[in-house]
Image (cartoon, rainbow, N blue to C red):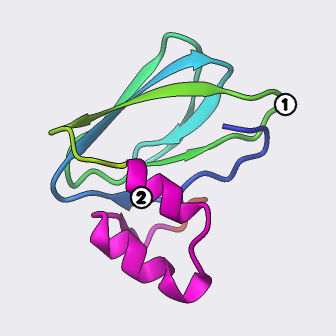
Amino acid sequence: MSPSSRGPAPHFHTIFSETFIVEEGDVDYFDGRAWRTLLPGDTAHAAAGDIHALRKERAGPATLLMALSPGVPREQYFEQLATVDERDMSRLHEAHDNHFADVHER
């Protein structure tokens, strides 16, 4: 993640869980209730259905390892996310099991 990356808004997935492992830098993680800072070696897990979010607010990049279970293909999602037109954003999220939560945290 680049410095000041907003990351995804609070969201959940219905068919897979995500585990985030910070390899370098620091990242803020939202577990559906509160934000906490993750440092190198820290791990956060969001089971299927759990609301979660990431953001990067401090200087310096961060590197994360994301493990998905079951191992759903996400490469196409991230490729399309970089170039998708705003009017097609909802379709992209729906097709890749991203459901944004009505949570007033960002």
Q: For residue 59, which numbered disc appears in the image?
A: 1
Quarter of the image containing the C terminus? bottom right
Q: Amino acid at mark 1?
A: Ala
Disc 2 or 1, which lies upstream in sequence?
1
> Bounds of the magenta span?
75-103
Image location (x, y in percent) of residue 77: 41, 58
Q: Is residue 72 left or right of residue 41?
A: left
Q: Is residue 88 left or right of residue 59?
A: left
Identify the residue at horizontal 74%, vertical 29% (top origin).
Answer: 61
Image location (x, y in percent) of residue 68: 27, 37
Image location (x, y in percent) of residue 105: 56, 60
Q: Is residue 60 left or right of residue 65?
A: right
Image location (x, y in percent) of residue 86: 60, 83
Q: Residues within 10 Å of mark 2 (few under 14, many from 20)?
A: some
Determine whether the residue tagged by mark 1 lies in a helix, strand or loop: loop
Q: Does residue 20 show up magenta in the picture?
A: no
Identify the residue at horizontal 19%, vertical 47% (top origin).
Answer: 16
Q: Which residue is mark 2?
A: 77
Q: Is residue 90 left or right of residue 19?
A: right
**Does residue 85 lie above or below 60 as drawn?**
below
